[in-house]
């Protein structure tokens, strides 16, 4: 249990105003960011919502932050290869929030070859557990973040540290602890980092399936590719022959399964036009 929860529950110290959740400064490290890592890493991916940023934070198994990135007002046709490039570079499993279009984006990334773990942050209890898990990782000294003041550290790491420093907890009207940033600010990088940390704790690992991987159709009971139309796929799925959401095995033949459904769900036209501009 995080220390502030312990004080509230057992020390009768009930917060009436917002309080800080993280102290990121003891976690700062002057160690240089590696150009590559050995083994698998975990990427937290927080997708843009309205005026927010799409945020990416990659952590190695020791919970050292090795990559931070964010962008806004970028349509999905541009975002997907950008995300996949980072997943390939760091051999990262992607931990993604299912809120909004997250479930469809998750399938799209899996169809592109990514290993994906899904988290439903629409649940306040799940979000609270994830944030408190990151809080405990900080308190136990497990987190390492490249020092933004080091000359070799990219400027984006300063934004991560600032978001962590400003992230706050306060009691809701129902007397539960709620988490977020002060009004008018952003917490996308914090959420992405919490997703990555959660992925490490839950054992997410693995990277991107090579493009030339093939799996026999008989393994999934699939129809020949040339016969795959929407009605045939629905019939076969209803019979339980094709998993609706394959997670780790996503070769080229399975990608065809998602093409029409993804275009429809994401609002793409037949030429793969943009999903949204933010």
Image: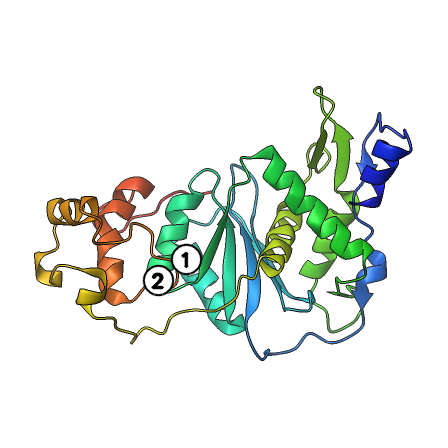
On the image, which quarter does residue 256 sit in? Answer: bottom left
Q: Does residue 49 lie above or below 25 as drawn? A: above
Please tell me how crowded label 2 is: few (under 14), some (14-19), or many (20+) other residues with Cα within 10 Å. many
* Residue that lies at the very extreme toward the left in this rendered image: 227
Residue named by callout 1? 80
Can residue 187 be spotted in the picture? no
Please tell me how crowded label 1 is: few (under 14), some (14-19), or many (20+) other residues with Cα within 10 Å. some
Q: Does residue 257 lie above or below 182 as drawn? A: below
Can residue 37 be spotted in the picture? yes
Q: Name the residue located 71 percent from the left edge and 51 percent from the top edge.
A: 134
Q: Name the residue located 57 percent from the left edge and 68 percent from the top edge.
A: 41
Whole-percent x and y of residue 14?
86, 28
Earlier along the polypeptide chain: callout 2 or callout 1?
1
Q: Name the residue located 76 percent from the left edge and 35 percent from the top edge.
A: 169
Q: Name the residue located 56 percent from the left edge and 35 percent from the top edge.
A: 123
Residue named by callout 2? 112
Left or right placement of residue 126 versus residue 73 in this view:
right
Whole-percent x and y of residue 89?
51, 73
On the image, which quarter does residue 40 sit in? Answer: bottom right
Whole-percent x and y of residue 198?
61, 54
* Residue that lies at the very extreme toward the top in this rendered image: 173
Q: Does residue 221 lie above or below 237 as drawn? A: below
Which circle, 2 or 1, is nearer the viewer?
A: 2
Q: Nearer the viewer, residue 9 or 92?
A: 9
Element type where label 2 sits in the image: loop
Q: Nearer the viewer, residue 41 or 165?
A: 41
The answer to whether marks 2 and 1 mark residues whose Cβ atoms lie closer than 8 Å is yes
């Amino acid at each position: 249990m995080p220390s502030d929860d312990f004080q509230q529950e057992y020390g009768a110290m009930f917060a009436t105003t917002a309080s800080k959740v993280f102290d990121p400064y003891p976690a700062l490290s002057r160690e240089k960011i590696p150009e590559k890592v050995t083994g698998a890493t975990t990427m937290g991916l927080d997708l843009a919502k309205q005026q927010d940023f799409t945020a990416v934070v990659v952590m190695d198994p020791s919970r050292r932050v090795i990559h931070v990135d964010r962008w806004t007002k970028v349509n999905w046709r541009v975002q997907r290869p950008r995300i996949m490039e980072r997943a390939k570079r760091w051999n990262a499993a992607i931990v993604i929030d299912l809120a909004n279009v997250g479930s469809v984006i998750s399938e799209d990334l899996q169809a592109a070859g990514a290993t994906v773990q899904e988290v439903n942050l629409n649940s306040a209890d799940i979000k609270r557990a994830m944030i408190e898990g990151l809080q405990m990782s900080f308190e136990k000294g497990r987190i390492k973040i490249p020092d933004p003041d080091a000359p070799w550290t990219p400027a984006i790491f300063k934004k991560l540290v600032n978001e962590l420093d400003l992230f706050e907890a306060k009691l809701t009207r129902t007397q539960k602890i709620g988490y977020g940033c002060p009004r008018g600010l952003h917490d996308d990088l914090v959420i992405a980092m919490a997703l990555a940390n959660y992925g490490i704790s839950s054992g997410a690992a693995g990277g991107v399936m090579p493009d030339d991987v093939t799996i026999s159709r008989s393994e999934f009971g699939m129809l020949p590719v040339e016969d795959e139309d929407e009605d045939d796929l629905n019939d076969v799925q209803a019979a339980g022959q094709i998993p609706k959401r394959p997670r780790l095995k996503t070769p080229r033949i399975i990608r065809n399964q998602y093409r029409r459904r993804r275009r429809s769900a994401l609002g793409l036209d037949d030429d793969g036009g943009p999903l949204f501009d933010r």
